[in-house]
Image (tube, rainbow, N blue to C red):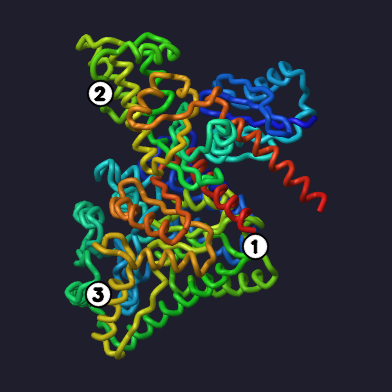
Amino acid sequence: MKYFAGIDIGSTAIKITIVDADKKLVGSKTSGSGSMFYKYAHETLDTLLAELSLTRDAIAYTVATGYGRKIFKEADENISEITANAIGAVAAAREFGSIKTIINIGGQDSKAISLDDEGNVVNFAMNDRCAAGTGKFLDACAMNLEISVEELGEKHFSATGTPLSINSTCAVFAESEIIGLLGNSHSVEDIVCGVHYSIAKRIVKLVKRVGVKEGIYFDGGPALNQGLVHAIENELGKKIFIPPYPQITTSLGAAIMGVDSYAYQNLENIS
Amino acid sequence: MPDKEEIMSKIEPHAIETPAQRQNRHKATEAITVLNTLKESFKKPPEAMQYFYDLFLEVYCRQKSLHSDKTKVGTMCIQIPSEIIYALDCVPIRLCNGFYTDDEIGSDLLPQKACPLVKASVGHLASKNFSDKPDMIYSPTTCDQKTKAGSTIESFGYEVVDVDFPRTKESEISREFFRRSIRNFSADLSRKTGNKLSAKKLKASISKIGYAQTLYHKLSELRKNKNVPILGSDMFLVTNAFFFDKIDHWIEACEKLVAELQTKAQEGFHAAGKVSPRIVYTGSPPIFPNYKIPLIIESSDAIIVADETCSSNRMFNDRVAVDEWFVNDMVDSLADKYLKACTCPVFSKNDDRIRRIVELVRSHNADGVIYQAFAGCTVYELEQRSVLAAMEREGISILYLESDYSPSQQGQLSTRVEAFIESLKIKNRKKT
């Protein structure tokens, strides 16, 4: 049996997904990127292979993606995370229906990707100018509020009244805004809710730039945060689909791309 | 090509550099990095490109003067007719600048959020690091920032003359307005230099620049072929040299380049890969060494086959149409060309620009358009919407990017460009 690996080296986490020749998910692993992308990527791959009782020889084709993609020299191919994300989302949402819009919130950027009927990228918009509206922003807010990122979701739903507004377009200044709100004895819950809405507004602006179409998919680590999902759904006025493992969509896409590229190249070699 | 060490060996260890030395070192680093990338990161460049690589190295790393024997007329924008300057025995030097080092100097003098091109041009004049210092500067009142930059530059001790430029181009009033403005400009330069504008000389300079345009069009024709013999980034270097080079040398070098590329084209040489998408580049101009976006595009397995920018196509595309070869008629015809044919987004209505982009996409068989706007270049930012909508109507894929002169952001920008290029490749694959 041949296996295919998708390696997504992001700013915050390394995500590795392995699929079989039928593009079925075999296993995945996530670890922190830290400062040594290359080393950690290899370690993560080895751990994952060991868990699946596979060896490197079983991997027929590897596709790297994410900001660190070029560092993983052993990859057979590397593609941008936008293309990989689109392929992965279409595959992950197969049972859900057809996907037309992808929202991705990563560690250091956020994206909205618009797809055509065949799942090809037709347009995309990115916020990579500042940390507001990214995973890093959530990290910073949680730290300020002395809670863990995992707690953000549940705090959101205990908020009372109208969500507070956080207007700053800069993550650093947003931090001082949060400190200001704390100083005015607002509750942590209300602030968390405000933070989620401030990210949601930003994301919705991004989505509007590529066009809001039915079939909205949300991935990236922050999609695990139910509070944020709720805020985005509210701002959009539409239901969004969250895959079971939102963090690995892009690496899944890379692995699937590997299956196709492998087939395409071997076809070429024969003919 | 010398490496950085050679250029920088002048610096003694532990010696504290003067600001000028430091700026020159930074600028030399910027220049060499780009030149080396052009030479080494792609297929072997045409031999005739060596002239241009050497020229930029001499001018920007060794501050070699090219025009010590002539009156040097600095121009702040594209709309000052070079033909008139040459006919008055002067040399035009276009001051639009692409150095991040100069942009940083300019940032202390202009608002932080101003356009990097304007900041760099002002910073360059403030730094006094010159191969050829302009004797006087003519500043067409095009965009707000360039218009206002004039007075800042004046405060450094330069003589800056405003050349009135209308923001509309479709009316007869604006045409008459700019004709008068160019008549004033030529009278002013004639008075300052003591040289008389003669019909013979003006006709000769119109025909010389016309010939330079012919050479550009020959290169452009070659880029329409399936196999494109030259990278877009190299082409930007060639047209960029026209800003300041000795015109006869430039013409000679271009003749060689055309000849070599014609041979290469016959041999079926292609500067990019087999499936590299073909790109039309538009927006804020790439000016040496700010070739950030062109280089990202071409190192992401695509090739720029044409452009719609004021550092290249816009300088060469349209000819002067002269009715009668009398001095006044020629001056008026020049004014018309520099106004009517201009596709700068400063104009209230600018459908010409959209038409030009579509035309270039069709004639060069391009797969998509990449539109760059400098952060702070308001007019290109403003025009983004209408251009994007027009491309959508025409069924042309387009990517809009915002960038500046800073060397950061490469990762983010290349992700966008690569994703766009991948989507073009997938489209092409499905077409076949």
* Residue at x-position 56% and y-position 30%: A249
Residue B56, above or below A177: below
* Depth order, front residue of A188/A41: A188
* Residue at x-position 37% and y-position 81%: B206
Q: CA distance from mark 2 to mark 1?
A: 55 Å
What is the three-letter code of the residue carrying label 1? His
Labels 2 and 3 touching (C-beta < 8 A): no
- Which image quarter holds the C terminus of chain B? bottom right
Residue B115, above or below B233: above
* Depth order, front residue of A42/B290: A42
Q: Which mark is residue B193?
A: 3
What is the three-letter code of the residue carrying label 2? Ser
Residue A195 seen by the camera: yes
* Depth order, front residue of A223/B197: A223
Residue pointed to by mark 1: B270
The disc, 3 or 1, on the residue closer to the chain's N-terminal end is: 3
- Chain of the residue under label 1: B
Comparing marks 2 and 1, which lies closer to the viewer? 2
Q: CA distance from mark 3 to mark 1?
A: 48 Å
Q: Considering the numbered disc 1 on the image, is that residue within a helix, a strand or a loop?
A: loop
Q: Considering the numbered disc 2 on the image, is that residue within a helix, a strand or a loop?
A: loop
Q: Which mark is residue A165?
A: 2
Q: Position of residue A68 (x, y in %)?
A: 57, 32
* Residue at x-position 68% and y-position 33%: A23
Q: Position of residue A94 (x, y in %)?
A: 58, 33
- Badge 1: how crowded within 10 Å, few (<14), some, or many (20+)? some
Q: Which mark is residue B325?
A: none
> Is B421 on the left or on the right of B133, as rendered?
right
Labels 3 and 1 touching (C-beta < 8 A): no
The reply to whether label 3 and label 1 mark residues of one chain is yes
* Residue at x-position 66% and y-position 27%: A25
